[in-house]
Image: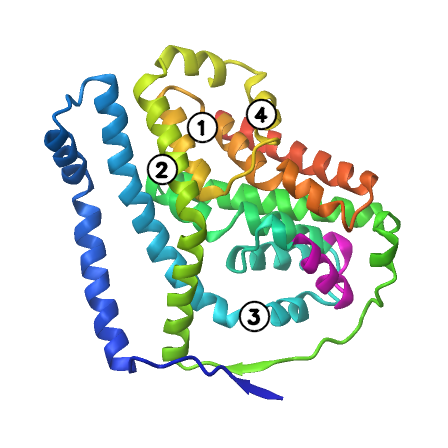
């Protein structure tokens, strides 16, 4: 069955290309003048950059447009990319894959098809009904929120390619290994009974969507409006917290609490992150501020990963489809992986 997406076409391809060219030039110009903008705000309100309040305000008005610009560019591009990875195609790619290859493919697909924890229940049902093994499903569900395009773009923009690349590689490793372990443990019996009754291997209808580039640009626009509409409060809240840390928290205090010399700081950061609930857009500005005050990179990244991959609200949602023993196994394996990443980052950087 050939279903064509009938998106409203208010612009031609030529109009889209012209608009995007102008948008790219405006994006570059704005990004190159972030410091000037923050300095202008301080001058306009009459604050001294070297005061605590001045440092906090400068951080806020520098990071807010920076993070929003990074998000806008990446989210628009990923909206286009996701037209190549519809949910039913993702399930079809993973269905019938064996452990190992399937886990790697699932983790990679998690990057380009990000889902938040609120999507866990329908994803589990859809994946299992398509015959995707339990361990492969877990690899996807771990990678999707933790190693998504927003996290990678912000890490690259704030810390550079080296940190973003290490995070990508180690995050994928956590997702793959955790899925492999869960698959080897054969814990299907710890799915809730109503989920286990789903007929494995059921064939899903295949939708062959045909997209033109106008369709893809329109999909990118919708994705941009939808995602930014959801995450901007988290962005502002995260940057506000980061600004307070940057302006008012003494450097020695954070170095003592979250420095690489404190061996207990990584597990403490993971425990602290679990009760919290936000996304990468909200937590990365906090990570940036903590690092600026002397916290170790591995420690704050372990904190970040636990917030977005092991949050208590996510566990409550997963309880609808998983029995407590499987949830505890999942949380324990992922937490062990996050601890390893934290210590490794502290060792390497």
Looking at the rendered structure, the secondary structure element under dot 4 is helix
| Residues at marks 1 and 4 touching, judged by CB atoms closer than 8 Å | no
Residue 108 is left or right of residue 13, and the answer is right
Q: Residues within 10 Å of mark 4 (few under 14, many from 20)?
A: some
Element carrying mark 2: helix
How far apart are the alpha carbons under marks 1 and 4? Answer: 16 Å
Which type of secondary structure does the marked residue at label 3 adopt? loop
Q: Compared with residue 202, is residue 326 higher up or lower down, i.e. above or below? A: above
Q: In which quarter of the image is the C terminus?
A: top left
Q: Earlier in the sequence, mark 2 or mark 1?
A: 2
Q: Which quadrant would the N terminus be assigned to in this image?
A: bottom right
- Which segment is the magenta one? 120-135
For label 4, the residue is 272
| Left or right relative to 31: residue 74 | right
Query: Who is closer to the viewer here, 201 or 163?
Result: 201
**Is label 1 or label 4 in front?**
4
Question: Disc 2 or disc 4, which is closer to the eye?
Answer: 4
Q: From the viewer's perspective, is the residue at label 2 or at label 3 nearer?
A: 3
In the visual, does 103 lie left or right of 56?
right
Across and down, in percent, residue 12 comes to 29, 82
Residue assigned mark 2:
159
Read off the residue under disc 1: 297
First in sequence: mark 1 or mark 4? 4
First in residue order: circle 2 vs circle 3: 3
């Amino acid at each position: 069955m050939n279903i064509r997406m009938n998106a409203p076409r208010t612009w031609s391809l030529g109009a889209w290309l012209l608009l995007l060219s102008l948008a790219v030039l405006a994006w570059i110009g704005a990004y190159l003048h972030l410091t000037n903008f923050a300095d202008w705000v301080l001058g306009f309100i009459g604050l001294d950059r070297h005061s605590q309040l001045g440092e906090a305000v400068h951080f806020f008005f520098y990071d807010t447009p920076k993070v929003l610009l990074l998000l806008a560019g990446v989210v628009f591009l990923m909206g286009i990319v996701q037209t190549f990875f519809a949910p039913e195609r993702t399930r079809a790619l993973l269905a019938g894959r064996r452990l190992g290859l399937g886990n790697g493919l699932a983790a990679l697909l998690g990057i380009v098809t990000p889902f938040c924890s609120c999507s866990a229940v329908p994803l589990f049902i859809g994946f299992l009904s398509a015959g995707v093994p339990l361990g492969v499903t877990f690899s996807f569900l771990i990678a999707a929120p933790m190693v998504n395009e927003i996290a990678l773009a912000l890490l690259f923009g704030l810390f550079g390619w080296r940190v973003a690349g290490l995070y990508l590689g180690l995050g994928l490793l956590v997702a793959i290994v955790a899925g492999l372990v869960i698959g080897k443990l054969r814990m299907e019996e710890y799915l809730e009974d109503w989920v286990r009754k789903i007929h494995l291997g059921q064939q899903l209808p295949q939708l062959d969507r045909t997209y033109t580039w106008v369709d893809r640009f329109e999909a990118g626009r919708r994705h941009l409006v939808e995602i930014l509409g959801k995450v901007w409060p988290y962005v502002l809240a995260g940057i506000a917290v980061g600004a307070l840390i940057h302006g008012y928290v003494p450097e020695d205090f954070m170095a003592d609490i979250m420095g690489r010399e404190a061996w207990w700081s990584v597990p403490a950061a993971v425990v602290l992150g679990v009760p919290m609930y936000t996304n990468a857009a909200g937590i990365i500005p906090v990570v940036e501020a903590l690092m600026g005050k002397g916290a170790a990179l591995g420690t704050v990244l372990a904190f970040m990963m636990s917030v977005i991959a092991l949050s208590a609200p996510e566990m409550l949602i997963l309880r609808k489809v998983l029995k407590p023993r499987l949830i505890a196994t999942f949380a324990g394996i992922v937490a062990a992986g996050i601890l390893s990443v934290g210590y490794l980052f502290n060792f390497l950087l």
